[in-house]
Image: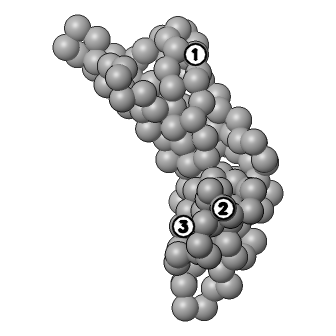
């Protein structure tokens, strides 16, 4: 996996960018979940700039001996994603943080899980957790 590079990303200007709807709503067309940009048609998952793809999921992972795990995108991006956000996906579980330490690729991203154990933050090694995530990048 390669480093996510902030210098290659830019935010679209809603006034000058063509926006296209994405699926995911109860009555909208099937498609990747998530939303960004202006509101989409009724029942849609929202809008993304033309040429972009938004996708997300809720994935159960098991960390390795360093507290890291890989999450794979359902559909590969054509380049490294512009944005990836990951959070604790199980509100009943102990608190933990998803540390994405800058690694990502067209096919997925690596995260490290850090949680509170015995009152102190520690890397959660060989642990199973649920991670909710969202990514947007070039289609």
The residue under label 2 is 27
Residue position for label 3: 36
Please tell me whether mark 3 or mark 2 is closer to you in this view.
Answer: 2
Residue 32, position as x, y percentages in the image: 69, 54
Q: Which residue is mark 1?
A: 62
- Check disc 1: other Cα within 10 Å, few if <14, some if 14-19, many if 20+: some
Q: How is the image coloured?
A: one colour
Q: Residue furthest bottom?
A: 15
- Kindly report which numbered mark, 1 or 2, lies closer to the viewer in this rendering: 2
| Camera-nearest residue between 39 and 114 | 39
The residue under the point 71% across, 35% down is 72
Disc with the residue nearer the chain's start (1 vs 2): 2
* Secondary structure beneath label 1: strand
- Of the image marks 3 and 1, the number of the one nearer the N terminus: 3
Seen at 43% across and 15% down, the residue is: 124
Determine crowd level at label 3: few under 14, some 14-19, many 20+ residues with C-alpha closer than 10 A: some
| Mark 3–mark 1 distance (CA, rounded to whole Å) | 30 Å
The answer to whether 1 is drawn above or below residue 50 in the figure is above
Inter-mark Cα distance, 1 to 2: 34 Å
């Amino acid at each position: 996996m390669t480093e996510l590079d902030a210098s290659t990303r830019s935010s679209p200007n809603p006034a000058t960018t063509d926006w296209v709807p994405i699926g995911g709503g109860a009555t909208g067309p099937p498609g990747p979940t998530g939303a960004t940009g202006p509101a989409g048609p009724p029942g849609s998952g929202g809008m993304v700039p033309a040429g972009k793809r938004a996708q997300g999921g809720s994935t159960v992972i098991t960390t390795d001996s360093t507290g890291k795990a890989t999450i794979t995108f359902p559909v590969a991006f054509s380049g490294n994603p512009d944005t990836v956000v990951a959070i604790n996906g199980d509100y009943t579980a102990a608190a933990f943080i998803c540390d994405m330490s800058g690694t990502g690729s067209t096919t997925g991203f690596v995260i490290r899980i850090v949680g509170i154990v015995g009152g102190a933050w520690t890397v959660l090694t060989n642990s199973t957790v649920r991670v909710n995530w969202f990514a947007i990048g070039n289609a």
